[in-house]
Amino acid sequence: MDLGLRGRVALVTGSSRGIGAAIAAGLAVEGCRVALCARGAEDLATTAGRIREGGADALAVPADLTALDEAERVVRETIAHYGGLDILVNNLGGGRGGDDDAAWAYTLDVNLGVAVRASRAAIPAMRAQGRGAILLIASVSGWQAGGAPAYNAAKAAEIMYARSLAKDLAPDGIRVNAVSPGSILFPGGGWERRQRRDPERIARFLAEDLPLGRFGTPEEVANVVVFLASDRASLVTGANIAVDGCQLKPSV
Ligand SMILES: NC(=O)c1ccc[n+]([C@@H]2O[C@H](COP(=O)([O-])OP(=O)(O)OC[C@H]3O[C@@H](n4cnc5c(N)ncnc54)[C@H](OP(=O)(O)O)[C@@H]3O)[C@@H](O)[C@H]2O)c1
């Protein structure tokens, strides 16, 4: 299936590794010109370099997106470099353990706040060209309890933000969707660390709570995101798509 993404410009936040890197690579394979962003400049350059080796354009913009105005700057630099912006994937997320005010403020900001600021910066360019696709990488934690409450609340908020924005931006030809992964394993990721720490507990989790009996891969999430970013998904907006293998519990 030709997704019609050739030449489209896509920015993926938090994209030097894991799900974000797989999304950037997946969009690039379909012909998108991609912009990547993370704090660590070296890993970011490596990931962007790998995409370029595959024959696609990749711009690396190092930034700490939780710093004020940085999301806006990254969007601005992407538009200045490529001359437009068609796809924004708000992938950055995560959390800090604990239940104190600092943990809540950080977790709400890194998941929701950064996505709001990046989307706000991207919308005028998308509106001007009469089309765009915004994606939010949420989580099954957005509707199933388990793990840190601040993370659950932040992911639920991302899902509702996608729905609200989709309604407001439909007349402008901009689609907005949330994609909610289950537990995704990759080198350097959180699940790899937990598996190394407590392999027996994780083996039980896989057997009891993940009906497929395994973790997901970043590429399995990316495949869905790439489709949703394309015009092939023209009637899909305001949706929250689970990519979770029917996962029964978000965490262990
Ligand atoms: N992995 C899972 O099982 C899972 C499940 C459900 C949902 N999700 C969601 O999927 C998304 C991606 O998760 P992941 O596990 O792939 O993430 P990850 O391993 O935490 O990777 C995050 C990426 O974001 C960058 N990053 C972190 N803090 C940043 C900041 N302040 N500014 C800019 N870049 C930053 C990291 O690079 P630097 O450290 O160099 O900045 C890295 O490239 C998140 O929204 C997460 O909540 C993940």
Image: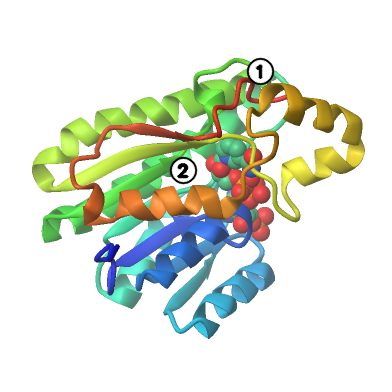
Q: Is residue 16 above or below residue 6?
A: above
Q: Is residue 25 left or right of residue 186?
A: left
The quadrant of the picture occupied by the N terminus is bottom left
| Secondary structure category for the residue under label 1 | loop
Q: Residues within 10 Å of mark 2 (few under 14, many from 20)?
A: many
For the question of whether residue 14 can be seen, the reply is no
Label number found at residue 93:
none
Q: Position of residue 200 (x, y in %)?
A: 90, 30
User: 196 or 63, which lies in front?
Assistant: 196
Q: Is residue 244 left or right of residue 82?
A: right
Residue drawn at x 52%, y 37% as measured from the top left: 111
The quadrant of the picture occupied by the C terminus is top right
Q: Position of residue 36 (x, y in %)?
A: 49, 65
| Secondary structure category for the residue under label 2 | helix
For the question of whether residue 77 can be seen, the reply is yes
Q: Is residue 199 left or right of residue 225?
A: right
Residue drawn at x 29%, y 53% as measured from the top left: 122
Disc 2: which residue: 114
Quarter of image, res 249? top right
Number of numbered discs visible in the structure rendering: 2
In the image, the residue with mark 2 has its CB under 8 Å from the nearest atom of ligand 1: yes
Q: Is residue 148 above or below residue 7?
A: above
Choose the circle earlier in sequence order: 1 or 2.
2
Label number found at residue 146:
1
User: 215 or 139, which lies in front?
Assistant: 215
Q: Is residue 188 above or below residue 78?
A: above
Q: Position of residue 26 (x, y in %)?
A: 46, 63
Which residue type carries mark 1?
A: Gly
Q: Position of residue 189 (x, y in %)?
A: 72, 48
Quarter of image, res 230? bottom left
Q: Nearer the viewer, mark 1 or mark 2?
A: 1
Residue drawn at x 24%, y 66% as measured from the top left: 4
